[in-house]
Amino acid sequence: MEESNVNVQASDEVSYDTLLKSKVLLQNREQTIIKQISDIIDTELERAGREDFSILEVGYGDGNRFRRLSNNYKSVKFTGLEVRQKPVDDMVALGYDCRLVEAELFNEFFGSDETFDIIYGFGVIHHMSDPYKSLESLIGLLKPGGVIVFFREHHKYDLLSHLYARMKGNWVYEKNTLKVKRKSFKELLGKYTKDYSVKYDNNTLSMCFTRFNSVFCKLKLNRVPFWSGLTIYAKMEKK
């Protein structure tokens, strides 16, 4: 991998709110996200037969999810990365291992002895000027048998996200979605493991309504690129 760095498309001055305004719906979405990553953590803890895991969250935002997971898995060491100074300062003040990044080849922010059992994030890869190089640098931080997963990544066909970003005037920070292609991620992950998937996930809005989400899936609308993000998953082979 060429050792040139990757710019992050993010800013302290930009509001990263979503289409959702209802507090209840936002809480429902957050509960779904927590369950998704918790299911993966539980599965990997059971497989490994140990609890001294190290987990990295990339782009933890306000830190609410990071704190909840840290509290739920007290034997696990959580580390967080964020591109905005204030969220990092706030979390460090609370005693969490959180670090500021301004450009991503992620190995630059960790010592050679710092590796992770699980690396995850929600909607962050598409903010990077070279999503594939960024993901590859994160793969390099995984332990043998480790898991990397990113949920709800916007991509070139994700029309709803494109329209909303333009409406909010945030397109300069979302334009890298045009570089995100399902096929390219599959090709990258296939270089490292056979146990991977890059699939369309459920629409963020539909996830907040249980009954509607069920219909959404039954109609296979969650497989339509225009209305869905990508979930990127890979489990590395044990050496």
Image: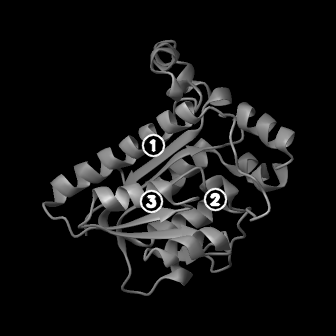
The residue positioned 55% from the left and 24% from the top of the image is: 206
Residue 131 is marked as 2
* Direction from residue 74 to residue 55 in the image, left or right: right
Q: What residue does disc 1 label? A: 33
Q: Residues within 10 Å of mark 1 (few under 14, many from 20)?
A: some
Q: Secondary structure at mark 3?
A: helix
Q: Secondary structure at mark 1?
A: helix
Residue type (three-letter) at the residue carrying disc 1: Ile
Q: What residue does disc 3 label? A: 66
Q: Secondary structure at mark 2?
A: helix
Rendered position, 85 above or below 229: below
Q: Nearer the viewer, residue 238 or 9?
A: 9
Rendered position, 31 above or below 65: above
CA separation in Å, label 2 and label 1: 22 Å
Residue type (three-letter) at the residue carrying disc 3: Phe
Q: Residues within 10 Å of mark 3 (few under 14, many from 20)?
A: many
The residue positioned 74% from the left and 62% from the top of the image is: 9
The residue positioned 49% from the left and 55% from the top of the image is: 64
Q: Residues within 10 Å of mark 2 (few under 14, many from 20)?
A: many
Residue 21 in the image: x percent, y percent? 66, 34
Image quarter in which the C terminus is found: bottom left
